[in-house]
Image: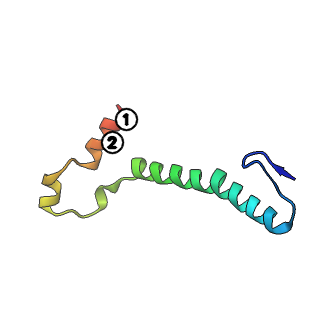
Amino acid sequence: MFDPLYEEIVTNTSDLMVYMVRHVYLELVLPLSIFVAVMLTLFVDWSCLPLSCIERESGLSLETIKKQLLE
């Protein structure tokens, strides 16, 4: 079997397992995990996390950042 992405020939079962893991991880698991992390960051209501008064005053709230990103 020829792997066109990496331009190498897969000849035995160990090469085939490396090929499958490489493709499944790089093309499915990694992009999906990045997508889920970004969606959780943007769409989950994080205001339930307790913050001290100093932390609230020192920076922008997550709500303000979300509004700036979505505008």
Residue receiving disc 1: 70
Q: Which amino acid, mark 2?
A: Lys
Question: Could you tell me which quadrant the C terminus lies in?
Answer: top left
In this orientation, which residue lies closer to the viewer: 65 or 2? 2
- Pointer 1: residues within 10 angstroms few (<14), some, or many (20+)? few
Callout 2 secondary element: helix
Residue at point 23% right, 49% down? Answer: 61
Q: Which amino acid, mark 1?
A: Leu
State whether residue 48 is above or below residue 41.
below
Residue at point 12% right, 60% down? Answer: 54
Please give left or right for residue 5 compared with residue 48 in the image: right
Tell me residue 70's x, y (percent): 37, 35
Residue receiving disc 2: 66
The disc label shown at residue 25, or none: none
Tell me residue 45's x, y (percent): 36, 53
In this orientation, which residue lies closer to the viewer: 62 or 24? 24
For marks 2 and 1, give the CA distance. Answer: 6 Å
